[in-house]
């Protein structure tokens, strides 16, 4: 009897909880929406208005103060591309970023495979050392790296940038790559060995194709970081035909009576490759970067 | 004979992992290129900074080069710009990270909800992460410049006098720089927290709703405990990164007006790039390195890094 009563009360309790829940949901849904939409729209504006501002200046005729770039003009692009040498800078930046991407990705594949697939003495120490390097400020390396490149005869040479960008990004690439390789099931590789593949063949034929998204992600991060590097470029490069885009931008900024239209056009040129790559890698940002990233 | 057949039989190997023909030194060979590059171009340079910090070494005054003892450090103690840069570094890191925490956490909580067009919104709000420091400067110079930037529109409605430069006015410079870096840095803070936020089990929220928990209660009892460690890590990472951040300040204010926005690493960069005083610059670097090491040790303690699966 008592049991029956308590069961009924319990059931009615559940029922009333469900109804209040439904009520609360319908009642608060308007508030919920507002609490989501209003801050989101405000934040989107904070993010996008600065981008729009740059596009506006880049495509607007000189002297105009209109808030829409109309009539649209490409004069500013012609000015920076030909007059300020951004054509050459763009080429140099591409060389540096692609070379840094290739070198760091290949080395990260080798090292990442070792970390993911072998137990070995000193592994924890190696990983720790790799992560510690991420705390070294770029500014701190300016003087000693300049000394080294001076000794090697590589100052004012794109190789100084390729090497320093690669080294700075390599530890992150390596740790990320180890994570991607670890996600490829060991059994697939073992099956290939059973079928008579050597370790190298198994890596090439089984792991590498499955690793493609990881390689693209790691390579893209390397590209972006090399493409964006300013400090090493301004320290190591001195002649204009070696400049990269960030150095070119800093010279436009430093000019007396800056031509804002040209500056904005230079900025748009600098941002295009990054936007294209970002559209692809942003899917990996949350999982990949939070796992191993230190730099932002 | 019998034993060799036995060891080769697949049955005896089934419980253990099959081993590929590899030798002990295989992993070392694989990490060698990375280790070598890092040793030559990161570890050795860090060491050489300590050596140069005890030298008079200025490219523009080669006749005065030589052993300096602690001269550079003594000079540093009497250098007002050094002390000023220390104070500003503290202010910069503290304010920037605190604001990135508030905005980044809020942003992560917003993006974590389900709504139409979430993927697009997510990539849009994260996009400043991929923008370089110098490009951030470019964008915000276009906004802050007195002749065609927002200052002009503010002046037109009578809020400020015409020709006001937000980047050189007393009081506005600090916040102008903070805002520009916030634009770039807050998304990264959100990225670091979002992964953890996505792993909260939704049943917990449903159970809490049944128990009548409100929005604040759910955040305090479920969300916050779950993301707390991620927030600790993200905060420290951002602090280290904002400490090291030179590009933006170097190009946006050049450390000015009158050294008021010069951080210690920026001071190092200016000493290296403009003055070419490598001895003094190295001494400044050593101090920056010591500060950062203390930071890193705290960070490693909190995070217990270096585990095998790191």
Image (cartoon, coloured by chain):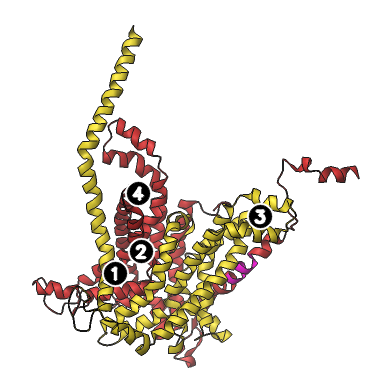
Chain colours: A yellow, B red
Q: Which residue is mark 1?
A: A51
**Mark 2 or 4 closer to N-term?**
4
Which residue is at a point 35% across and 74% down the rendered structure image? B135
**Mark 1 or 3 closer to N-term?**
1
Q: Residue furthest right?
A: B1
Q: Which stretch is magenta?
A: B31-37
Any part of residue A48 in sight: yes
Residue nearer the viewer, A108 or A153: A108
Quarter of the figure that contains the N terminus of chain B: top right
Q: Which residue is mark 3?
A: A118
Q: Which is the main secondary structure of the residues drawn in magenta?
A: helix
In this rendering, do the residues under marks 1 and 2 share a single chain?
Answer: no
Tell me the chain of label 2: B
Which residue is at a point 48% across and 66% down the rendered structure image? A220
Give the label on residue B127, or none: 2
How packed mark 2 is, by other alpha carbons closer than 10 Å (few <14, some 14-19, many 20 or more), is many
């Amino acid at each position: 009897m008592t049991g029956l009563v308590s069961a009924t009360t319990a059931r009615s309790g559940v029922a009333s909880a469900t109804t209040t829940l439904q009520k609360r949901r319908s009642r608060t849904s308007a508030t919920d929406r507002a609490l989501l939409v209003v801050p989101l729209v405000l934040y989107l504006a904070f993010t996008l208005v600065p981008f729009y501002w740059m596009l506006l200046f880049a495509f607007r005729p000189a002297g105009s103060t209109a808030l829409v770039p109309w009539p649209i003009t490409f004069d500013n692009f012609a000015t920076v591309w030909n007059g300020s040498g951004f054509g050459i800078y763009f080429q140099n930046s591409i060389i540096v970023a692609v070379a840094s991407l290739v070198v760091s990705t290949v080395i990260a594949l080798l090292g990442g495979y070792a970390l993911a697939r072998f137990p070995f003495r000193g592994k924890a120490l190696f990983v720790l050392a790799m992560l510690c390097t991420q705390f070294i400020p770029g500014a701190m390396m300016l003087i000693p790296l300049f000394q080294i490149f001076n000794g090697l005869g590589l100052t004012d040479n794109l190789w100084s940038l390729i090497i320093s960008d690669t080294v700075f990004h390599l530890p992150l690439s390596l740790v990320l790559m180890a994570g991607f390789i670890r996600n490829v099931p060991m059994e697939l590789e073992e099956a290939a060995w059973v079928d008579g593949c050597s370790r190298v063949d198994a890596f090439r034929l089984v792991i590498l194709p499955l690793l493609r998204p990881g390689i693209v992600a790691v390579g893209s991060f390397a590209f972006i970081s090399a493409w964006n590097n300013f400090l090493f470029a301004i320290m190591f490069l001195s002649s204009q035909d070696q400049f990269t885009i960030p150095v070119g931008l800093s010279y436009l900024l430093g000019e007396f009576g800056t031509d804002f239209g040209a500056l904005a056009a230079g900025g748009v040129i600098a941002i295009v490759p990054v936007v294209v790559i970002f559209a692809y890698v942003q899917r990996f940002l949350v999982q990949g970067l939070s796992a191993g990233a230190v730099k932002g | 004979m019998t034993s060799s057949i036995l060891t080769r039989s697949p049955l005896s190997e089934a419980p253990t992992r099959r081993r590929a023909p590899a030798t002990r030194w295989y992993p070392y060979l694989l990490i060698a290129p990375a280790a070598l590059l890092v040793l030559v171009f990161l570890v050795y340079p860090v060491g050489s900074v300590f050596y140069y910090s005890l030298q008079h070494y200025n490219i523009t005054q080669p006749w005065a080069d030589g052993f300096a003892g602690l001269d550079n450090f003594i000079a540093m103690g009497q250098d007002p710009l050094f002390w000023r840069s220390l104070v500003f570094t503290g202010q910069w890191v503290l304010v920037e990270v605190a604001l990135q925490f508030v905005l980044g956490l809020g942003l992560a909580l917003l993006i974590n909800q389900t709504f139409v067009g979430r993927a697009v919104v997510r990539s849009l709000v994260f996009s400043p992460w991929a923008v370089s420091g110098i490009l951030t400067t470019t964008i915000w110079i276009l906004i802050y410049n007195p002749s065609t930037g927002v200052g002009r529109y503010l002046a037109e409605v009578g809020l400020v006098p015409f020709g006001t430069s937000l980047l050189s006015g007393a009081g506005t410079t600090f916040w102008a720089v903070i805002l520009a870096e916030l634009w770039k840095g807050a998304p990264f803070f959100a990225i670091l927290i979002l992964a953890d936020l996505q792993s909260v089990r939704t049943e917990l929220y449903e159970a809490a709703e049944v128990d009548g928990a409100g929005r604040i209660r759910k955040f305090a009892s479920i969300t916050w405990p779950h993301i707390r460690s991620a927030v600790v890590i993200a905060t420290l990472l951002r602090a280290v990164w904002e400490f090291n951040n030179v590009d933006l300040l170097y190009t946006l204010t050049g450390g000015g007006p009158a050294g008021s926005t010069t951080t210690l690493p920026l001071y190092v960069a200016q000493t290296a790039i403009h003055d070419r005083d490598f001895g003094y610059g190295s001494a400044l670097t050593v101090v920056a390195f010591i500060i950062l090491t203390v930071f890193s040790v705290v960070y490693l303690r909190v995070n217990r890094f270096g585990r095998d699966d790191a």
